Image (cartoon, grey):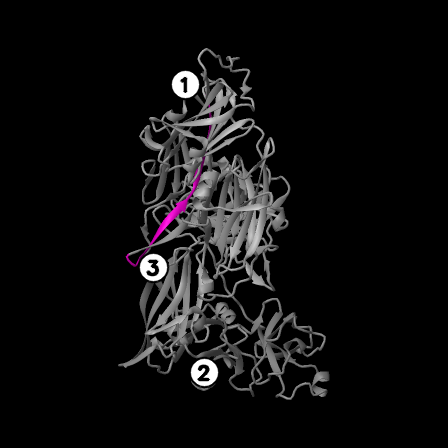
Amino acid sequence: MVGVFILGLFLLSLFGSIEAQKTQSTNIQSKCLGNILRVDVGPLRGKLLEVSAVVGNSAYKLTQSLATQCGFSMKYNQQETIVIYASIHNCFAQNMGDSFRTVLNLRLYGNQMVQGEVYQVAETCSYSTPASREIICDRNYMEVSVKRVVPDDYAKPRNLVPGTQSKSDHGRATEKLIDSGYKISTLVLNTPEEKKMTLMEAQRHGYRIANTPTRLVLRSSKSAPDTYIQHVAGVPMAVLQATTIFKKKWLTTEIEAAAACPIVDGSVYITEKLISWFLPTRIDPLISSGKLKLLEVHVGIDGRRLNGAEVSARRYNMTVDHMYIAVHIPIGAPGGFFKSVVQNGQYFVCYVIEPMLELLWMEDATNRDTRYKVLFPITTPPMSQPVQVYDNTVVQQQVFNVVIGPFAPDVALANITLAEEVLTVMDSTKRSLSVQEHRAHNSSLKFFALKLPFTDKAVLLKKETGVTVYSLKVTLGLVVLPEFAPFSYSTNLKAKMVNAGKPSISGICDSRNFYILVQYGMQGHTFRTTLGKRLLTQSVAQEYGFTENGTHFSVVVPFTSQDVAYEAIDVSVKKIEGSFIKGRLDVMLQNPETNHNLQAFTLTCSFPATLIECLPNGTMTALAVKLESVPSLNPRQLTLRDPACVPAYSNDRYAYFVFTGNTCGTTRKFLSNVMLYENEISLPDALLKRGALDEPEYELKVSCYYDVNTSRAMTFHTRPRRNEPYAENGKGELQVALRLAVDDSYNEFYGDSDYPISKYLQQPLYFEVELVRSMNPKVSLELENCWATVDEDRASQPRWNLIINGCPNPVDPHSVVFHPVWTDDRVQYPSHIKRFAVQMFAFAEDQDNLKKQLYLHCDVEICDPRNRLSEVCRNRRCSSQDNRIKVQKRATSDLDLRHVSSGCILVK
């Protein structure tokens, strides 16, 4: 970086907006992280950032060399954000004893570098207990800060004039600061040969020396000519060793300061899936005694420490032994991001992450502590990122619909070439071309979605035998920001449409359903379908079990459906018999644009239900069906001869009557050897007189015959019961396990030693309940109830009900999603396993009141379908109606339940 210390991005403002986005103000956040200050600025939204340090009424623009010399570094982060790091001992910090105040001016420029918005950040970082020696290894500089004490391993007195004695050693327990009368006279650099400089010469060579009343701060570029490379336990490190000589009249004293920072090449090993960073446990250039006691080791990201739960949740791993401190980070893990790279016009991605190690050690010989902090940016070598085209084109819609990607977040779409015509993204809105940007689920990777009608002039049309071929060549012009590295991706799209022919309809019926098959061939489903009097909408299709395979679809319509019409074969016949009533289903296919009828089909079947039952005890039942010939009939108004005898049950299509031979106006006749009971179902006279119906009169007769003189003969004989074997009921133990999966693939699970497990608000929880060690394929595991508590006690309060009687909680049905289970290498019997996901916000009264600790509990039952008494084994359905889930309640005391619980889950 040369010139003014400016970073920024000309983002999508050069190319037009890809999709409408809400305007966001620039967000600036500052945070003290021990001995460094971090400032986040973003999103930049296509602007350039200039940083100046403020002292009093003066502002100093930070160039690259000034930033290195004064303890500043800067990096581009994802989502158009710039991160600024500053040592609390930076050149412009105001030292206020135990606190340090830094003031920065942040100027955001537009594309023409004129005017701009200015924001000021003022942050005071308290640091009351610094170590005797503090070392920072940042991106572009190394810094060492030591106490101004004499004498110790960092301070050695010497005489300037022969015969003059320096101050005596009062012991390590009584540290004494070098008084303010001593001034820096000389800087001696060990390269490893000695090289002496005056203070002014050191400043001109890029070194920065700060001399406060209590500390000496020395800062240098990692690439300064007086630094040298030393391999420590095989790890290459840049080393700076210097002695600062203080002078007071004829007395002189000196303080030694050293810094050693690891170099990426030689300390980082990268495989296809893992980054491994090794730092020596004992950094020899910084240790003067033989014995070392390591007091603290912290791992972090972007200057911030991570606790153990966060390290585990991000799937990082750290090991410490007598040789190395090793940090292992999976490529793609949280905390890093993917960065695009273009090489020879080809697209690659790198994974970028900046881990941090912070150590605190004590040397026995000096009894002084050292705090050592390394901010260590790591970028993987370019990895191939194949770009895919996901073709979602539906030929019948006459629109190309494709998704192209994935790309890293720093890729911007500059233009689109259709055939030979180049369009900017802004120009595409003037055409029928639709361009949108999408983010991948649970990832920062992006995709570009394009839609273009077949009627666009760039689409080529070719007629072939029986088909029409539509083709289009699309080239995306892309750039990688902020470097503006250009590259392109081209694809040829094709869609074939079979020349349309008339669809056909066929169907059959049984005692329960109509089965309709509509065949339309390769030309696709371009027509509108009517069943009875209703359009085949998505909800109707779901109701009738709609299935489709691209060339035909089928539906199953129950005989009792509202779309089935009932008709009498002969309306003059008054006697009710099933053979005189038919059910009819009409199917119509229409052109949605012209409303022209393409095909009509009618399927008629005999009414399957028994309309009249004559019971031996003299009770009679009758079912009156609304016929199509009397469309205005309300079956609820029908009665028997006695108007007081109304239906036992009725609706808009049926009326069901129950009566006896001596009630409701039933008449009796004696015929040869039989007795005939008769009644009629009709509308009351009062309704008929008011002219309630304009249709023909509705009158149906009910008749039952009973034998008067009939003899029945019946014989039986017995035989001794044999001693046949039979099975007795018994009890046994079946083991049930509850596991928490790492993700929705259910391939990897957390073990008992992993608890407590930390999860972020954006992460759902994927649970699996399994019947263990059962080899019986006929049994199944059923979830009865599942809930969450704050305490480990399953009966504690508060309690969040997730699953009730096998169905999602009707109060919050969207908090639980059931996942199907398929047979694979691990799963032999899918009926033995249930899987479901829980949204994190299900555990709160509101999103701002999310609990920090959770346990999950479930009641399960082992189901055997051969047990007819088990309600669980029956087909359970959780139906949705009026946006509420209705669950049939069952007494849990009647169930043989087993109980399982999870370990502790921490919510971040």
Earlier residue among tags 1 and 3:
1
Label 1 secondary element: loop
Q: Relative to residue 590, is residue 251 depicted above or below? A: above
Q: Nearer the viewer, mark 1 or mark 3?
A: 1
The kind of residue on which mark 3 rests is: Val
Residue wearing tag 1: 289
Q: How many neighbours does mark 2 have within 10 angstroms: few (below 14), some (14-19), or many (20 or more)? A: some
Residue wearing tag 3: 387
Q: Are marks 1 and 2 in contact (CB under 8 Å)?
A: no
| Nearer to the camera, 812 or 494 | 494
Q: How far is disc 3 from disc 2 in space, using C-alphas?
A: 41 Å
Side (left or right) of 702 relative to 823: right
Q: Are marks 1 and 3 in contact (CB under 8 Å)?
A: no
Q: Relative to residue 794, is residue 511 depicted above or below? A: below
Residue wearing tag 2: 590
Residue range corresponding to the magenta coloring:
344-362
Pick the quarter of the image with the C terminus.
top right
